[in-house]
Image (cartoon, helix red, strand yellow):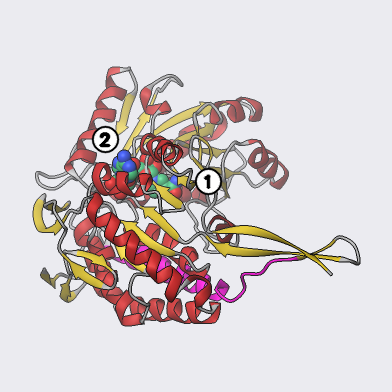
Amino acid sequence: FTHTFDTPSYKGTATVNTGLFINGQWVDPVEGGTIDVYNPATGDVITAISGGTAKDVDLAVDAAKKAYKTSWGLKCPGAVRGKLLNKLADLLEKNIDEFTALEVLDAGKVYDKAKLQDIGGAITVIRYYAGWADKIQGKTIETNDTKLAYTRHEPYGVVGQIIPWNFPMGMLSWKIAPALATGNTIVLKPSEITPLTALRLGDLINEAGFPPGVVNIVNGYGHTVGDAITHHPLIEKVAFTGSTLTGRKVLKASAESNLKAVTLELGGKSPTIIFDDADIEQAVKWAAHGIFFNMGQACTAGSRIFIQEGIYDTFLAKFTEVAKYLGATTGDPFTIGTQHGPQVSQTQFDRVMGYINSGKEEGATVHIGGARHGDKGYFIQPTIFTDVKPEMKIVQEEIFGPVCALIKFKTEEEVIEAANDTIYGLACHIFSQNLSRALRVTHSLEAGSAWVNCSQVAEASVPFGGYKQSGIGRELGEYALDTYTQVKGVHINI
Ligand code: NAD
């Protein structure tokens, strides 16, 4: 499928193979059909891609297993793996506008932000792990003078990777880069809703020179391809990012099949806490970024905003202005100046509108927003709820849209308890100029990521993952290397 872009942000074409990428070749599914891909800004079908089945996963695993044994894993020096990853990052950088345009077309992201954060971020992560590829080291362990012990960090072999639609290239890079750096081969399933950039990447994998079978990309639905990956007896580890509901299924499938190692990056209902000694302008700016970034479709979205009573009214007034500005700059994500785009799909649009209606029904006040924007595509106005109660669905459940609940609080103790009153534990945001207080609160919150006086900052070198029902394991940083290797303890008699 070739798409010609003639937009204010990008003029050019993108050509994407819509088949399955197995053993370095584009192939049709053994059986199975096609899946329509939509432009969320218009609701129009862009193209149809192949949807695989378990039979295609079998072929991909065979190719990955063969590649692991013959040309990757411990057969390929780390320096070579790093060089290929760097080549891949260079190729992505060379084609950054095309990748950005595809991501905007497919996921509805705002162009400039997608270029910087999604594709730019993916390049950074791939380079970061390229640097690690020749630094995977064990330890020698002193026992006594007639024995030597040491550890080796060995790859799992074939790993399965399943990603969601909200950061297609971002999540892809967090998955493939550490897995390849440590010597694993991959069977990757992109989200069926946003497959285009992952498919385009297949061509770059070949162009960079990765041996055939090292990376295999099998598109399809969760209940077909996803289910086959999680049950496959020759896949030794599965890394999953998506909803908590599906995460449970992944863990169950691993238990029922071959007890594969599992890392899960799941949902969230993250608190943003603003104390009355915060720099109010900064707090407003970052709290707005925390919830409205990517149209609220971020697992770490700061969707519960707790504000200390002394600054509540001032915060609300200033925060409302930001929501108004975003509302006024909502529109075509390719248009320069657009700040707020559509939700990714009709399903997500319906889900978010369903939560907005439930908030109204449960007695919360829509302070601003609360409605569709325009008459085509899946746009929803930035929405602020006030007069909320802790038990309301909009306070307890992940909405995954541009919708937040504002909650007034009095004391530090009270807000810590309220912030932790959730099944999730992915992230938290704390605003205060009192460093002791900011750190005290940060350490009391049950969350894998904490942002103090900022929000939604991801660094390739800093671990990311969830407490409680937000996940198991960590991605990014040196920590991710451990989740893609198993440790062998070797004992030698001297
Ligand atoms: P989802 O769980 O519906 O789907 C995620 C992926 O899993 C998709 O590729 C889907 O096809 C696949 N899948 C679905 N059913 C499956 C099954 N039975 N077996 C195997 N795979 C299956 O989630 P989504 O709607 O694509 O993404 C939104 C969710 O992802 C939100 O809950 C969000 O919080 C979460 N998320 C978490 C992180 C994180 O790092 N913690 C990052 C991004 C998104």
Whether residue 122 is in magenta: the answer is: yes
- Type of secondary structure dominating the magenta stretch: helix
Q: Is residue 401 left or right of residue 459?
A: left
User: Label 1's element?
Assistant: helix
Q: Is residue 315 left or right of residue 478?
A: left
Answer yes or no: is residue 94 visible: no
Q: Is residue 21 above or below residue 319?
A: below
Badge 2 crowding class, 10 Å Cα cut-off, few under 14, some 14 to 19, many 20 or more, is many
Gap in Å between the C-alphas at discs 1 and 2?
29 Å
Query: Which of 243 and 109 lies nearest the eye of the viewer?
Result: 243
Which segment is the magenta one? 111-139
Residue at the spot x=36%, y=30% of the render?
A: 385
Image quadrant of residue 409?
A: top right
- Type of amino acid under label 1: Ile
Residue highlighted by disc 2: 352
Residue highlighted by disc 1: 280
Residue at the spot x=64%, y=30% of the render?
A: 412
Look at the image and tell me in which quarter the N terminus lies.
bottom left
